[in-house]
Image: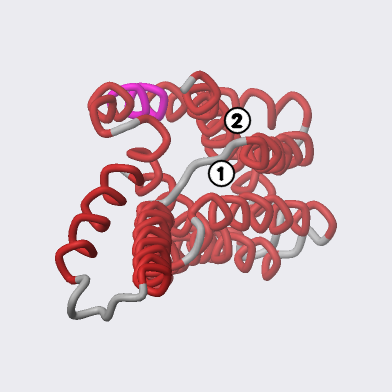
Amino acid sequence: MKGYKGYLYVNALSSLGSRMDLIASSALIFTFADSVYWLSAFFVARQIGGMMFSMAAGILADRMDRRRAMLISDIGAGLAILLVLLYPHPYVIVGAAFVKGMLYSLFHISFQASLPQMFGKDALVNINGLTVRLESIVGIAGFAFGGVLTESFGYGVVIAFDAATFFVSAIVLMRLRWENDEQQGTDHGDVRQERETASSVLVWRHIRLSGKTPASSRGQSACIFRSLEHGFA
């Protein structure tokens, strides 16, 4: 529980970096010709990426391991941001914004769906409240720090910080483990199958050793099944 709760703060740090990155990327875009058009394209691409990929992200979060989906999202977003630092071109910035929008949808859906397994359903109200408070704080602090740090140190430092927060989040995720609902259901099904197989083998072995036919041993088989159920339970 403590490790999972600590990850909420790591995720908030990543959100802080993303808010700061919006300011830094905007400052970078204003150094290009036709900056107003590129700035519009930057924000539109970010929103369209998330909107177009939202349905696919929901399907992926339902069918694949959600922790792995979150890891892919963090690493992909970090690499997309680093690409902006290596090639600070308008097309690269707009393309990275589109990719980040897609990956944000995948991460957010997977993260929200994982909260019951991470904290338990009874703690969801408190956890959701904490998440909302953290998002509100980083929403204000991120834009404030983004402007000050971009003006003081340049857009490169702020964008690099944003990339680093995604990689830190991925590293922390690698150390965490939780089960999806589907995995838990599969495990329970495997246990039931093992119980049924073991019961069938033991009953048939008893019938063969006793030299009786299955029809004549029906009463004894029922008793054995009941005893096995109590033993496996």
Residue located at (40% from left, 45% from top):
114
Q: Mark 1 points at which residue?
A: 22
Residue 31 appears left or right of 198:
right
How busy is the neighbourhood of tag 1: few (under 14 within 10 Å), some, or many (20 plus)?
A: many
Label 1 close to label 2 by CB (< 8 Å): yes
Residue located at (25% from left, 79% from top):
214
Residue 174 appears left or right of 191:
right
Residue located at (65% from left, 34% from top):
172
Quick one: SS at disc 2?
Answer: helix
Q: Find residue 146 and name its label.
A: 2
Residue located at (42% from left, 62% from top):
198
Nearest to N terminus: mark 1 or mark 2:
1
Quick one: SS at disc 1?
Answer: helix
Q: Position of residue 128 (x, y in %)?
A: 30, 30
Label 2 amino acid? Gly
The one of 114 and 37 positioned closer to us in this rendering: 114
Q: What stretch is highlighted in magenta?
A: 129-135
